Amino acid sequence: MSRLANALLHIRGTYPALRPAEKRVAQVILSDPREAVHYSITQLAEKAEVSDATVVKFCKRLGYKGYQEFKIMLAQDVAVKPQLIHGEVEPGNDVQTIKEKIFQANISALQETAQVLETEALERAVQALANAGEIHFYGVGASGIVALDAEQKFSRIGLRTSAFLDTHLQIARAVHLREGDVAVCLSFSGETVEIVEALRAAKQAGALTIAITSFSGSTLAREADVLLLTSTQQNLFRSGAIASRLTQLSTIDVLFIAVALVDHERAQEAIEKTRAILSQRRLERLKGS
């Protein structure tokens, strides 16, 4: 599905790159998209305190031909998108309410990611990873946990894979990549300075770069060779570390399974070899205990 087909996701993903006046238009729409569907261009302009021309520029900056096309896409979006019933966790919520809110936020984030993650970009990433001489995963914080998970998965199918969480080591290793290698850079905001620097170092070294981020207007998204977008949903306590981690993990899972199926026999053989050596070590430990 094209990113343009999901207007709300596209607005949130592009928001950081919008100009101040355009951000006011975005804020009006995002605050009540079901009501915004009914606004004329003049009504929307008045509520955002901008000119009609700014609304048109806002629509075109998002990639739409004009306000009418944007409005049609927005109407389709809100018609099928259920409103979040539970919202943000708040002080005083009991455990049952917290459980429902967290699961609802995670489910919604995964559903949105499934919509916005483009098949063409996935296919290009899978092809590059399957043929890579060496694969690096870069992440910090919650994204670093995802990088480690990716290293574990791709290593099991016999690919030369490393995850780097230390920001100095990321750049130190990125400069030694070469043509045919792949660097996967994970950042919810797409503006984590150290990850952007690692991407630039890998790209300059000749490696293909893949960005997994939630903001299409971010520096990481603009500079990567392949962009894999995840949900931009506001997460609980306004932290990108909860639902975004799940969307990144799910994206890695898609890449892993798709890459494994490129050469299923080789991947299966590598998995069996790993399983055999681990089983042997467990037996040796049992004998020694």
Image: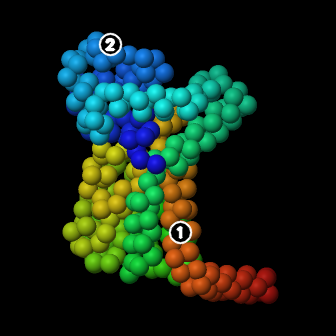
Q: For the point 38% across and 41% down, which residue is it?
A: 4
> Looking at this view, is 265 or 247 the one in front?
265
On the image, the x and y values in percent for residue 287 come to 79, 87
Closer to the eye: label 1 or 2: 2
On the image, the x and y values in percent for residue 211 come to 37, 57
Circle 1 Cα neighbour tier, 10 Å, few/some/many (<14 / 14–19 / ≥20): some
Q: Report the Cα–Cα distance between label 1 and label 2.
A: 47 Å
Q: Residue 185: tell me if it is visible.
A: no
> Looking at this view, is 117 or 241 the one in front?
117
- Please state if 227 lies on the left or on the right of 154 as rendered: left
Q: Which residue is mark 1?
A: 258
Q: Reading the chain from its start, which is encountered first: label 1 or label 2?
A: 2
- Please state if 86 lies on the left or on the right of 173 as rendered: right
Name the secondary structure under disc 2.
helix
Q: Quadrant of residue 93?
A: top right
Q: Is residue 53 above or below residue 185?
A: above
